[in-house]
Image (spheres, rainbow, N blue to C red):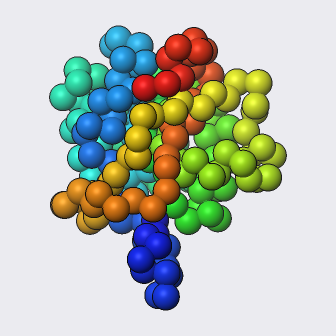
């Protein structure tokens, strides 16, 4: 993730985490009693995503030692995660998610939906974009939420069969 004020020293920084209020925006879209796999937890020891989804009443599987690109898929109904910002990692994860074939909701920078790779990787017949009101902000290093995110994010849903009304949260 990057911030425009850092542009003279631009570097991708992937250690931002999703605050509970961002997940709260989509929790009503998740089927009751669903088992969720938080699949992008590799090394994310400061992430609170799994605890957040558990506090919403869902069964959650995931581990900070599992690499979504190589690990076995656990028993789950759907995948919910905030994938890394770095493009090559993101592409690899999107390809893996399509291979797995399970329904998912992921957070991505909204600009990604315009990219060639997004359209080449995703099954567009089963992909929907959930648009949140306002910007999603993230917690740097899992601690303090930063309110200066320089881009808008969307939730990308796959095989969720949402209604048009559900696409705006």
Whether residue 151 appears in this view of the structure is yes
Position of residue 28 relative to residue 3, above or below, is: above
The one nearer the camera, 50 or 165, is: 165
Residue 71 lies, in percent from the top left, at 51, 48
Q: Residue at x 76, y 24 (%)?
A: 125
* Residue found at the very far bottom of the displayed protein: 8
The one nearer the camera, 157 or 149, is: 149
- In the image, taking residue 126 as reference, residue 39 lies left or right, namely left
Q: Residue at x 49, y 50 (%)?
A: 152
Position of residue 9 relative to residue 148, above or below, is: below
Residue 26 lies, in percent from the top left, at 39, 26
Total marks placed: 0
In the rendered image, the quadrant that contains the C terminus is top left
Q: Residue at x 61, y 40 (%)?
A: 97
Residue 149 lies, in percent from the top left, at 39, 59
The one nearer the camera, 48 or 59, is: 48
- In the image, taking residue 99 as reference, residue 18 lies left or right, namely left
Q: Residue at x 38, y 46 (%)?
A: 136
Whether residue 43 appears in this view of the structure is no
Position of residue 72 relative to residue 34, above or below, is: below
The one nearer the camera, 152 or 55, is: 152
Position of residue 90 relative to residue 106, above or below, is: below
Based on the displayed image, in which of its 4 quarters is residue 126 positioned?
top right
Residue 36 lies, in percent from the top left, at 39, 29
- In the image, taking residue 13 as reference, residue 55 lies left or right, namely left
């Amino acid at each position: 993730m990057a911030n425009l004020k850092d542009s003279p020293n631009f570097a991708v920084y992937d250690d931002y985490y999703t605050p509970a209020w961002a997940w709260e925006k989509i929790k009503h879209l998740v089927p009751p009693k669903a088992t969720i796999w938080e699949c992008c937890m590799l090394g994310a020891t400061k992430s609170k995503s799994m605890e957040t989804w558990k506090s919403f009443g869902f069964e959650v599987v995931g581990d900070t030692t599992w690499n979504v690109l190589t690990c076995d898929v656990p028993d789950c109904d759907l995948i919910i995660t905030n994938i890394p910002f770095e493009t090559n990692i993101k592409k690899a994860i999107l390809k893996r998610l399509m291979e797995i074939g399970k329904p998912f909701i992921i957070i991505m920078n909204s600009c990604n939906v315009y990219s060639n790779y997004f359209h080449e990787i995703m099954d567009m017949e089963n992909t929907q974009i959930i648009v949140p009101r306002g910007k999603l902000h993230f917690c740097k290093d899992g601690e303090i939420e930063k309110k200066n995110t320089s881009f808008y994010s969307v939730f990308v849903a796959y095989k969720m069969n949402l209604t048009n009304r559900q696409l705006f949260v």
